[in-house]
Amino acid sequence: MANNLPESGSLLQRSVTTTVARNLANTTKTVPQMMSITPRWLLKLLPWVHVASGTYRVNRTKIELQKPERIGIDFHRGIASFRPESLKSIPLFSTLDDEVISSLARKFVIEEAELGSTLILEGENRHKLFIVAHGQIEVLSKGLHGEDLRIALLSQGEYFGEEELVSDKPSGVTIRTITPGTIFSVSNTDVEQLFREKPAFRDSFKAAAEEYLKLRSTVNKHGEKHIDLVSGFAENVEIPETYVDYTNKPREYSLNAIQTVVRVHTRVSDLYNDPYNQIEQQMRLTIEGIRERQEWEFINNREFGLLHSADPVQRISTRYGTPTPDDLDDLLTLVWKKPAFFLAHPRAIAAFERECTWRGVPPVTINLFGSPVITWRGVPIVPCDKIEINKNNKSGIGTTNIILVRVGESEQGVVGLHQAGIPGEISPSLSARLMGLDKLGVASYLLTQYSSLAVLTDDALAVLENVEVGYYHDYEHRKSVAKSK
């Protein structure tokens, strides 16, 4: 008796199988997918300025009074130090002779401070200049009702107390640590000892202080010269004369080039071009990579990136590490003139949302380009994975930054720079050029993206530093405490 059963089962085969039939059918295919593609919100939200000459010059008013800058801290085998000349970053010391600066630097002592240590107590008859090498300290002053008011939060490279060094009044502030840290300090007693050793230094110090105070009275809080005006209805009042001076060395931004060469074998483009054009797909994916690198440069480039363009006075640190609503409110006080959007790593946004949940103040969500985005005080918090998370080797927990910007030329904000109409252009400021074929039949295409970014005024950009992203609240413990009450 013949065996009519198929080998694969116990039933008779009544139709051609799907496995065999699939050989006669076309497969529905997608274009190549790439996981590294992101929304690139920054490139979408920035207003772009056409730079016809390839160079963009930002003219500003002249800064008469030097702005305070952070002091560079060097670490060698875990030991902190700073270069004596870096003390000239302190405006009060900027005009002192190198000999005075070097002698003053030698008077600094380094100390390790524990969490909650009081460095100066309000009312004490001693004064110190503190430079934070590592960690954080806060400066407190008493309010009208006796409460402690924080007037400064200092982190690495920041300082406090330079004007009090030559003061004989009791200290008006309390200075204490809020994290363990390393601090450089010099006291008014040390400075007096220096003056006794070298009396000429006293005159230099006094002259520098007088010049600083005199100059400070003639400028506004941004260091720009006051514009002399008169107002009122009084008669026979002489109208003052004034003018606005410009900086003699304005900053110029040159367009940054991102380039690569795409190679496609002619045999591939000849024989395997249906249903998708191989050259187009190679170009498309490479351009996506170029755009991703472009956004990374706008954030991290040391010449023009946002993180490196923020003025020292526009940088603040988180109070407790995690990004709280209070921290973002402080950031808004620095860019209060028409803030456009925050920029943060997705994990930083998640950390902020956890803090909002803990406090019971969920942020409002809006729709931006078809995606839900949370806001704070009406300002969107836009995710961007190009803001990197720096790993802490001791704890394994990472910290990052949150950026707040104002945008637009008319608003004296942040703008993107490009040049439209370049040869071989396939999109504004992006060109593709055929370089030719080699002896192996491989075609080469040169892709070039020209762009840059400019910050028109210092108060158009602020950065929240030391943002901890790894902390989670214990909600179960909170529930148990609430039940016990």
Image: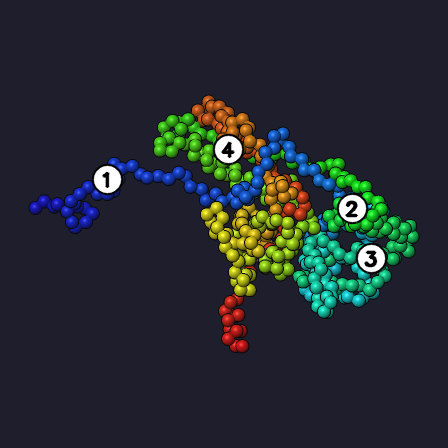
56 left or right of 192 in image = left
Out of 328 and 394, give the one closest to the viewer: 328
**Label 4: which secondary element:** strand
How was this image coloured?
rainbow
Residue appearing at x 67%, y 47% in the figure: 459
Residue appearing at x 43%, y 31% in the figure: 279
First in sequence, mark 1 or 3: give its number. 1
Q: Is residue 76 visible?
A: no
**What percent of the width, then of the height, locates residue 134?**
69, 56
Quote the CA–CA distance across marks 2 and 4.
Answer: 50 Å
Residue that mark 1 sits on: 21
Residue type, numbered disc 1: Ala
Out of 434 and 350, give the one closest to the viewer: 350
Quote the CA–CA distance across marks 1 and 2.
Answer: 89 Å
List the single residue furthest toward the bottom. Answer: 485
**Label 1: which secondary element:** helix
Residue type, numbered disc 2: Leu
14 left or right of 80 in image = left
**What percent of the width, then of the height, locates residue 40?**
52, 44
Residue that mark 2 sits on: 229
Residue appearing at x 53%, y 42% in the figure: 44
Residue type, numbered disc 3: Leu
Quote the CA–CA distance across marks 2 and 3.
Answer: 35 Å
Residue appearing at x 76%, y 40% in the figure: 244
